[in-house]
Image (cartoon, rainbow, N blue to C red):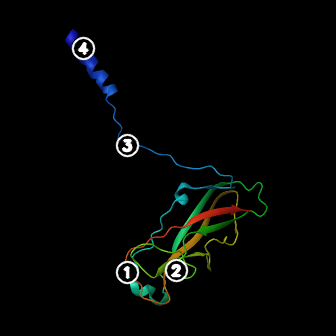
Amino acid sequence: MNTVLLSIGLLVGSVSVAQAADGTVTFLGSVHSGACSIKPDSVDQTIPLGAIAKHQLQAGGKSEPRRLLIELEGCDLAGLTDNTVTTTFTGAPSGVVPGALGTVGSAGNVGIMMTHGSQPVRLGVPTTPQIIATGDNTLEFGAYVQGAATGDVLPGDFSAVTNFTLAYQ
């Protein structure tokens, strides 16, 4: 009987001690003084621009535009005078497509153009102010690949990075 109780005690004790770490969870974020919070999916995004046929980009041709959304939440307009926000995108400019974001990778003679409505986004220049309301808001932009006006577009992979800053008025 003592052997059975000792065995049960050891089994129960080993079950509670036999815990292993199977993974980790990292929490990231920041606190800022802006009028709105930025939803986590909007802070760091990847926008797939697709596998684009070379002929579509030759002589300044363009790919189909893709949406880029910045989703805001919990907006509190107290302290704002115009209830608007501007967005400034920054990044390395293209050396071959004027006004475009430069790319890295094996693809050549292409750049990434961004739009705000029907207007091109100029790197380092705030966009036209967008009206925001209390609560949740979505800022919508577009992005597409454009080939250089001259020279041969070179097939290959590419990537580009832009940062954005919001300014509330």
Q: Earlier in the sequence, mark 3 or mark 1?
A: 3
Q: Earlier in the sequence, mark 1 or mark 4?
A: 4
- Kindly tell me whether residue 32 is visible in this rendering: yes
- The residue that appears at 22% across and 9% down in the rendered structure is 2
| Residue 33 on image: x %, y % | 69, 52
Label 3: how many Cα within 10 Å (few below 14, some 14–19, many 20+)? few
Q: Earlier in the sequence, mark 4 or mark 2?
A: 4
Residue indicated by mark 2 = 95
How far apart are labels 1 and 4 at the CA level?
A: 71 Å
Quadrant of the frame with the C terminus? bottom right
Can you tell which of label 1 and label 4 is closer to the viewer? 1
Q: Earlier in the sequence, mark 3 or mark 2?
A: 3
The kind of residue on which mark 2 rests is Gly
Residue indicated by mark 1 = 155
Relative vertical location of residue 35 with respect to residue 163 in this rendering, above or below: above
Residue indicated by mark 3 = 23
